[in-house]
Image (cartoon, helix red, strand yellow):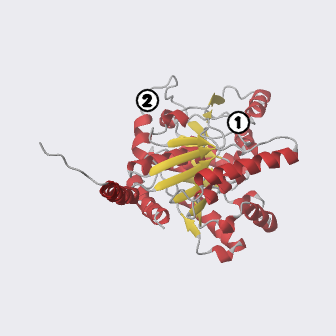
Amino acid sequence: MFVVIISPIEVMKAIYITDEKMEKTNKKERKYMKKLLFAAHSLGLGGIETALVTLLEELVKKEYDITLILEKKEGIFLDTLNSNIKVEEYCPSNNRFIFLRKIINMCKQIKFRIEYKNKFDFAAAYATYSLSNGFVARAASKNSALWVHLDYLTLNNNDEEKTKQYYKKLKCEEFKNIIFVSNESKNNFLKLFPECKNKAIYCNNLIDGKKIIEKSKEDIPEKKENIITFLNVGRHDEKQKRLTRLIEVADMLKNDKLEFKILLIGDGKDTDQYKKIIKEKNLQDKIFLLGRKKNPYPYYKISDCVILTSDYEGYPVVFLESMILKIPIITTNVSDYKEVEGKFGIVTTKDINEIYNAMKKFITDKYHIKQEFDYKKYNEEIIQKLEKILNK
């Protein structure tokens, strides 16, 4: 029997060598598991939320370590997220006493910095309108990005000074990159901030075409009818979506004795207003409010045309969804409308008479899509851009 005697110095050496090896191994693992953080408001129904969930699902497949921080840990998409995505909440105080609110939020910011400061390889403020999202992203990573989903110059009726002040309030100059989902919003931004040319990037939203096609096959109570059916999917926010235009046009078409239906999927702060106007105009047999749907895609399949009457958008996700499901589009001339015009549908101005003429022509003549949409090629180009941004 042999007894091996090891001195304390040798034990310490062995521990040191083991720790050093483990640290090298951990560094190698970290090299292939980049830590990404995304900050958003919530995961309620909407185009921005749909785009975010699609993006996160794609990044998880590529084995990134992802944390999602929400102002409100709620929403229709929350339960659909991949279980590998960590979801946390950072909710700023809305206390009505200004001084107390500032103290509470300062404490929250200090706590967040202690826990997360520069702990991520990349961090994005995905909800442009959220000041707290901006703080979270800038604190969490030196490689931070502001994600811009709307053309704010158009939103502000081309008021350049108001738009400038809005971006300055967001501290856009402190982000390493500013990502625009539409070319028009990027170009309008650069008119105001030419010095940001090197950090402004156009990168459209990813789209999960395969999932959309599969989910469109699910059964729903409503069935395809032998009547021209228009579909609008989105948040009920009159300031942006201007669904009163659609209701007004429906009234005009009904007076023409034309046969048609309009399905509205979604809800929001102006839903009751729309219900009231529809009832006043006696359009209950023409316009049907179906509420929010976790899976809206079967409704595309029972519709003949997707319609937008908005004042402004980023690059609308419903454009992509319609193109994948081969449903023609009628849209007002919102951002990047040229992607639709002459290929996937009809573009109008925001004038009610033009929208009326387009819908009337569709009812009588329909519209045949001129081009096939290759969502795989579309996604590949976006992923290449994203990889460059994430790996800076």
Q: Amino acid at mark 2?
A: Glu
Picture layout, residue 217 above or below residue 182:
above
Q: Position of residue 152 (x, y in %)?
A: 71, 60
Q: Position of residue 170 (x, y in %)?
A: 72, 60
Q: Residue furthest bottom?
A: 195
Q: Position of residue 128 (x, y in %)?
A: 66, 55
Q: Position of residue 54 (x, y in %)?
A: 48, 46
The mark tally for this picture is 2
Q: Residue furthest top?
A: 221
Q: Which residue is under mark 2? A: 218
Q: Name the foreground residue: 79 vs 321.
A: 79
Quarter where residue 387 is shown: bottom left
Q: Residue at x 59, y 71 (%)?
A: 199
Q: Residue at x 66, y 56 (%)?
A: 134
Q: Decide if residue 255 is in sight here.
A: yes
- Please state, as top left, top right, bottom left or bottom right, where the N terminus lies in the image: top left
Element under disc 2: loop
Label at residue 268: 1
Label at residue 85: none
Q: Name the foreground residue: 92 vs 203.
A: 92
Q: Residue at x 41, y 32 (%)?
A: 217
Q: Decide if residue 323 is in sight here.
A: no
- The 10 Å Cα crowd at callout 2, few under 14, some 14 to 19, many 20 or more, is few
Q: Earlier in the sequence, mark 1 or mark 2?
A: 2
Mark 1 vs mark 2, foreground winner is 1
Residues at discs 1 and 2 in contact (Cβ within 8 Å): no
Q: CA distance from mark 1 to mark 2?
A: 25 Å
- The 10 Å Cα crowd at callout 1, few under 14, some 14 to 19, many 20 or more, is some
Name the side, left or right, on which 96 lies relative to 201.
right
Picture layout, residue 224 above or below residue 375:
above
Q: Amino acid at mark 1?
A: Gly
Element under disc 1: loop
